[in-house]
């Protein structure tokens, strides 16, 4: 799992820039649901969210869940959230 997350993190950083990559950071999909994808790419640099809070789905370009033992949950429940 860690190897997969790290590979996605580096690949996405190469494509979008390191300042847009969040690892295991929350996304505010609703008032009661704040999932933490393994990696995501935001529209603004991640420093912006340190002061403004958790990004919403509209502020996220790419969401990555690396599944080794949780594939069914990631393709079902989490996919509907994102």
Image (spheres, grey):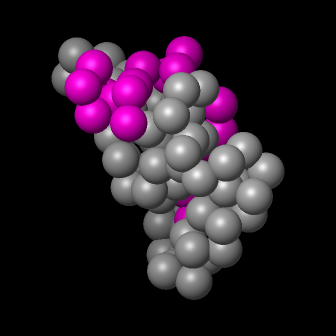
Whole-percent x, y for residue 76 in the image: 54, 44
Q: Does the segment drawn in magenta span residue 25?
A: no
Q: Is residue 41 left or right of residue 48?
A: right
Say above or below: 58 vs 14: above
Viewer-proximal residue among 69 and 48: 48
Name which quarter of the figure residue 27 lies in. Answer: top left
Whole-percent x, y for residue 62 in the image: 65, 39
Task: Return the residue found at the far right.
Answer: 15
Say above or below: 82 vs 2: above
Whole-percent x, y for residue 80 in the image: 53, 31
Query: Which residue sits at x=46%, y=49%?
Result: 22
Viewer-proximal residue among 17 and 8: 17
User: For the magenta stretch, what is the residue range?
Assistant: 47-66
Q: Is residue 47 left or right of residue 78?
A: left
Query: Which residue sits at x=33%, y=40%?
Result: 26
Name which quarter of the figure residue 4 lies in. Answer: bottom right
Q: Is residue 76 visible?
A: no
Query: Which residue sits at x=67%, y=56%?
Result: 13
């Amino acid at each position: 799992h860690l190897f997969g997350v790290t590979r996605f993190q580096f690949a996405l950083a190469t494509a979008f820039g390191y300042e847009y990559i969040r690892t295991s950071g929350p996304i505010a999909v609703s008032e009661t649901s704040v999932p933490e994808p393994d990696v995501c790419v935001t529209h603004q640099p991640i420093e912006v969210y340190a002061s403004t809070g958790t990004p919403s789905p509209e502020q996220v370009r790419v969401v990555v869940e690396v599944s080794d033992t949780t594939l069914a949950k990631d393709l079902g429940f989490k996919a509907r959230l994102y």
